[in-house]
Amino acid sequence: MAQAKAITVAPKVDAELARRLLSQMVLIRRFEEKAAEMYALGKIGGFLHLYIGEEAVAVGATAALRPDDYAISSYREHGHCLAKGSDPRRIMAELFGRRDGLSKGRGGSMHLFDKSKNFLGGHAIVGAHLPLAAGAAFAVKYQGGDQVVVCYFGDGAVPQGEFHESLNLAALWKLPVIYLCENNRYAMGTAIHRALAQTEIWRYAETYGIAGEAVDGMDVLAVREVVGRAVERGRRGQGPSLIEARTYRFRGHSMRDPSAAIYRTKEEVEREKQRDPIALFRGRCLKDGVLTEGEVKTIEKDINDLVDEAVAFADASPEPPLEWLTTDIFKE
Amino acid sequence: MSVMTYREALNLALREEMRRDPRVFLLGEEIGVYDGAYKVTQGLLKEFGERRVMDTPICESGFTGVAIGAAMLGLRPVVEMMTFNFAILALDQIVNSAAKMSYMSGGQFNVPIVVRGPGGPAHQLAAQHSQSMESYFYHVPGLKVVRPSTPEDAKGLLKSAIRDENPVIFIESETLYGIKGEVPDDADFTIPLGRAKIRREGTDVTVIAYMGMMYRALETAEALAQEGISCEIVDPRTLRPMDIETLIGSVRKTHRAVVVEAGAGFAGMGSEIVAFITENAFDDLDAPVERVTGANAPMPYAKNLEQAKTPSKEKIIAAIRRVCYA
């Protein structure tokens, strides 16, 4: 099987697609910035893991999917859920722990689920959702469907046994699942070279005899192209793929790691911010004349309004009724 | 009615449910080509093929996770743990994924899986293969836990477990696979989860026990009947949800209770049963409730030590005599 490290030549992009990709990335960025503000105001509790800096991965990958394809993620999943098309108002309400949240306020930031969008959830035990992704792909195959499952996870999940168990099972059973590693180089505060004997994560594909590719995770079009190839393989019955998207988290691991500077240098963070995926894509669209300054401004304004509306919606949503403490534990 | 072994009753339940519902499939180690480590799945590969009887490599966490993911999309997987002791490797998937999925997704995704296999004391299988595993699971909200003692229960309860919309932990026993009993032939025969069964009616003392301990309690009751002590034996069958009503009803009748369990006693099933008897029927009691439990030790290999670890007939008799002041 082909295990090429992708060196992607940027494909052409039309205005409609450019607008969609930029809107989604800006939406995730703005949503996360707002979530951080709301956390500071005490409107959001618990753990809050922001996706800022990694937007091109979720948006590029989702752009390669059909709406009936599935996605599943870890606890840093707001971006994946937004990209899959979930209502930002209901996501914010979930973060607020309110009645109109996607998960009725019982999941919180780490457990967003949206059945209507085939979003199979945010899962907060590192590595544990990788077998679930294989299982969803198993069900698709069992039922004779042609959907694929995209499974997002961080480099922190790679040393877990379940990463290896899942790749082995998915390869063995030729399951239509795309394991998309968002390598942001730190598992919480542990740098990748302190955690992995093999830091080129896409190379684990070789071990399991499946397709593996690395891609610049700051380039939304490159991600879309590489994931698109994996989607085609999955739909054609050629089994799973492992993609390593090289990206960077601009903020801390969670809101409780505000400086994010104990385990990495300020210089490094500043250097990586020079490759901000949104700035890169916006710059390119303007340079190529695909979008105008005015169009970009309109997108940004519309998104600001959308996120403000999400906050207003979440704020207005009541707390869950106390009866919900014990409902939905079982399905009747 | 047909007379069959407990093993055959399980096999029949799987076969009937697979015929009835194309969404039901099996996965686990050695269940197909090998016909099952304990032959519970014998012949199922031949009838249903590799698509529905999936041999897995040895990766309990991985294949249990696969089953949970498949269940989220509407399939109804039955996972075999070659022995339930191996389910500890899948504990995170069972506890953190399966049990909580419905709740933390606001009811959007339920997980209709059955995890089944043998557990508890067997024949000199030593510390890592003899644990009474139910205690790892019945604590967890979102799981149902079944321990079927007879061939009839094995069939009827397994069928209900497969039809249930929620994760069900179904723990059998190596020592019971060979026992025979009458089993209804009707393919629609099921036993609802959460209903206890009175195995023997009596008037002086309620003895609550399941699996091998239930049979030991029955022997004990026979012996004590000679002395004029009448024992009522109640088998919970489903540990969660527990049929408190039947258990309490029996205690209200006899005014005395002894709980027998094979597992180590500390925070065991008996602790919980004693607690709810105390909470619900304290004024009905004529004596403190007694527990007869396995010793608080890992299971030893040596035959005499293994016997000493597990509650004996003599210990059960002594406990019954104490509560009866006899």
Image (cartoon, helix red, strand yellow):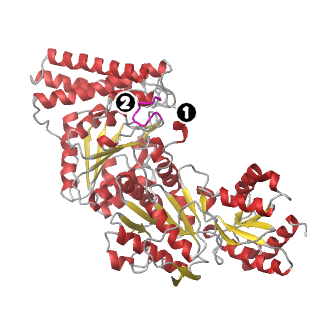
Q: Is residue B29 above or below residue B33?
A: above
Of residues B197 and A237, the one drawn nearer to the viewer in this rendering: B197
Residue drawn where x is 20% and y is 30% of the image: A21
Badge 1 density bin: few <14, some 14–19, many ≥20, Cα 10 Å: few
Cα separation, mark 2 vs mark 1, equals 20 Å
Of residues A302 and B240, the one drawn nearer to the viewer in this rendering: B240
Residue B284 belongs to magenta span: no
Q: Which residue is outermost to the right? A: B326
Task: Say whether disc 2 or disc 1 marks the residue closer to the N-terminus.
Answer: 2
Residue drawn where x is 21% and y is 59% of the image: A238
- Asked if marks 2 and 1 touch (Cβ < 8 Å), the reply is no
Prevalent SS, magenta region: loop
Res B30 seen here: yes
Query: Where is mark 2, residue-wise?
Result: A90
Residue A247: x %, y % from top left: 32, 35
Q: Which residue is outermost to the bottom? A: B3
Residue A102 belongs to magenta span: yes
Q: In the structure shown, which secondary structural element does the residue marked by tag 2 occupy?
A: helix
Task: Specify the amino acid type for callout 2.
Answer: Arg
Residue B150: x %, y % from top left: 59, 75
